[in-house]
């Protein structure tokens, strides 16, 4: 029982020490910011990483636009396919409306009845 209490107290004491150290670090950072001092080393490193990522993204975008310019009018094929698809859908819609209309439907029904009854 005493060993468990001692271990628990040791863990609690260690947690308290860590919390105090973290509070001291945060206080130093806060006071440095209030004084207008430079960011901490972590923030500078983080800013450097973000800048590197921005440069990589810019380079990738430049490469992609360069490839598109070199290809020329290859993108037009996609637009032509889209227009052809829209025309096909429009034609299919018109044919559907005609076939489901009253006159065509009655003519088809008459043809089926004639074929069945001979």
Image (cartoon, rainbow, N blue to C red):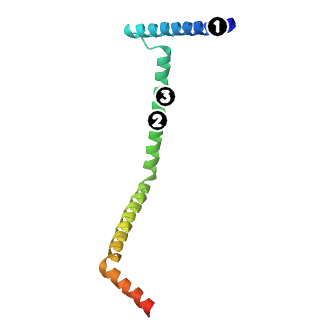
> What residue do we see at 33% from left, 83% from top?
106
Indicate the quadrant where residue 92 lies.
bottom left
Q: Nearer the viewer, residue 38 or 75?
A: 38
| Rendered location of residue 56, percent (x, y) | 49, 33
The outermost residue toward the bottom is 118
Q: Is residue 82 left or right of residue 14?
A: left
Mark 2 in CB contact with mark 3 (< 8 angstroms) = no
What's the residue at 46%, 44% (across, down)?
A: 64
Residue that badge 1 annotates? 5
Q: Which mark is residue 57?
A: 2
Q: Are marks 1 and 2 in contact (CB under 8 Å)?
A: no
Q: Secondary structure at mark 2?
A: helix
Q: Nearer the viewer, residue 71 or 112?
A: 112
Looking at the rendered image, the quarter that the N terminus falls into is top right
Q: On the image, which quarter does residue 54 sit in?
A: top left
Q: Earlier in the sequence, mark 3 or mark 1?
A: 1
Gap between marks 3 and 1 measured at Cα: 51 Å
Disc 2 or 3, which lies upstream in sequence?
A: 3
Relative height, residue 69 to residue 25 (above, below): below
Under circle 3, the secondary element is: helix
Quadrant of the image occupied by residue 99: bottom left
The mark closer to the camera, 1 or 2, is 1
- Could you say which disc has been placed on residue 52 in the image? 3
SS label for mark 1 = helix
Q: Nearer the viewer, mark 3 or mark 1?
A: 1
Distance CA(mark 1)–CA(mark 2): 56 Å
The span from disc 2 to disc 3 (Cα, nearest Å) is 9 Å
For label 3, count other residues whose C-alpha is less than 10 Å away and answer few (under 14), some (14-19) or many (20+): few
Residue 38: percent from left, percent from top: 42, 12
- Rendered residue at 41%/86% (across/down): 112
- Quadrant occupied by the C terminus: bottom left
């Amino acid at each position: 029982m005493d060993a468990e209490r001692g271990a628990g107290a040791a863990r609690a004491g260690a947690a308290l020490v860590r919390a105090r150290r973290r509070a001291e670090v945060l206080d130093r950072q806060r006071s440095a910011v209030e004084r207008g001092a430079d960011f901490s080393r972590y923030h500078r490193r983080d800013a450097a990483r973000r800048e590197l990522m921005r440069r990589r993204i810019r380079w990738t975008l430049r490469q992609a636009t360069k490839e598109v310019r070199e290809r020329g009018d290859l993108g037009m094929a996609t637009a032509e396919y889209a227009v052809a698809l829209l025309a096909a859908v429009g034609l299919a819609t018109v044919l559907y409306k005609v076939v489901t209309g009253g006159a065509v439907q009655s003519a088809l029904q008459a043809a089926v009845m004639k074929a069945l009854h001979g």
